[in-house]
Image (spheres, helix red, strand yellow):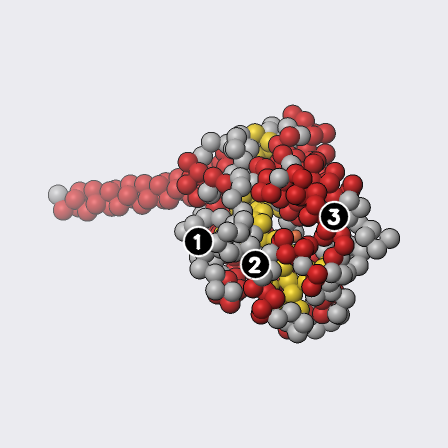
Amino acid sequence: MKKRFVSLIAVMAIVLTVLTVLTGCQSVSEVQKSTEDAGEVNIYTTRHYDTDEELYSKFTKETGIKVNIVSDKALVSIEKIKEQGENVQADVFITSDAGNLANAKSEDILQPISSQTLNNNIPEKYRDVDDYWFGLTKRARVLLYSKDRVTNDELKTLTYSSLVNDERWKDKVLVRSSSNIYNQSLVASFIKTMGEEKTVEWVAKLKTQMAKNPEGNDRDQAVAIKDGIGDIAIANSYYYGQIANETDKTSEYYGVSDMVNIYFPNQGENESGVHVNISGVGVIKNASNKENAIKLIEFLSEAEQQEIFSATNYEFPVNKDAKTSDLLQSWLDNQGITELKEQDINLSVLGDNNAKAYEIMTAANWDSPKK
Ligand code: FE
């Protein structure tokens, strides 16, 4: 009896062990299966920042979804996506500037996305009116100025308007060319905020204030201030962050922020607010991994990721729950800004007015004021 009891225990033990092994095997294969099932998502991006790649790896770690990236200029990506048609190889299009996103929408390469998460995380003014694209980060088109030559009193009256009307800035303003989408979007925003006639006037007057013919990128305008070529420049805010954090002593941008500061114009009570643009994203029309594409965009819109964009790429979060990084906050604090006043426009306007803006800039001969 005792013997039978022992052998029964032994049989039970063997059964248990086999069951455990079987269950164990099953759970391992399930993990493998779920990783395989997570699949992939393919991105066409015009952004080339380390921050973005770090966030994609974080996404893969958290979801198991593999991220493949192709980088190109906006127009090249849009053309490629159009050519590939129904066999498109990418699922997500990421680019800077609402003008580029609006262009992607009008070229019919995106599809509308209905997501409560995105609607919650991204304020309406940073989303396409038909949900074809979504803003992920904000950048202000600010004024950079010479710390030595521009006084605090002069800053007090400095606006987009005084920049072109005040004799003080004659032959002192630096700006890049009209082919640049950031400038086109700035002018497109003015068509909405001040009307077409006044925008034509603004562009014509800006030309007479330019220190030299437009050339180089936004950061090069800051270098020209350091070199004494002009006193004030139009540039995107995150470039000032890049300059301020330049650690390569051989870089032409190294130390420029010692001589140049950042200023957010049009913050007064009766002012229009600073021009704010976005970097944003859309799901490609014939995407084969649509669900993963939406998951990625929702992930990037979460406060945690938004704070990483702000801390490491010097962009402002679009998600109100995300904290603006200390550096960006210090810029606002220095100017006594408690809440940044932005132009009160839906950014879809930048796409709608892009062609008109470029026409105005070309007609005014923006690129060769000095002949
Ligand atoms: Fe840029």
Between disc 1 and disc 3, the foreground one is 3
Dividing the picture into quadrants, the one containing residue 168 is bottom right
Dividing the picture into quadrants, the one containing residue 108 is top right
Q: Neighbour class for label 1 at 10 Å: few (<14), some, many (≥20)? A: some
The image shows a total of numbered marks equal to 3
- Give the residue displayed 72% in from the left and 51% down from the top: 205
- Give the residue displayed 24% in from the left and 42% down from the top: 12
Q: Is residue 307 left or right of residue 43?
A: left
Secondary element type, mark 1: loop
Residue beneath disc 1: 322
**Alpha-carbon distance for marks 1 and 2?**
21 Å
Secondary element type, mark 2: loop
Residue beneath disc 3: 204
Q: Name the kind of residue labelled 3 in the image.
A: Ala
Q: Earlier in the sequence, mark 1 or mark 3?
A: 3
Residue beneath disc 2: 264
Between disc 3 and disc 2, the foreground one is 3
Residue lying furthest right in this view?
371
Q: Earlier in the sequence, mark 1 or mark 2?
A: 2
* 217 and 143: which is toward the camera: 143
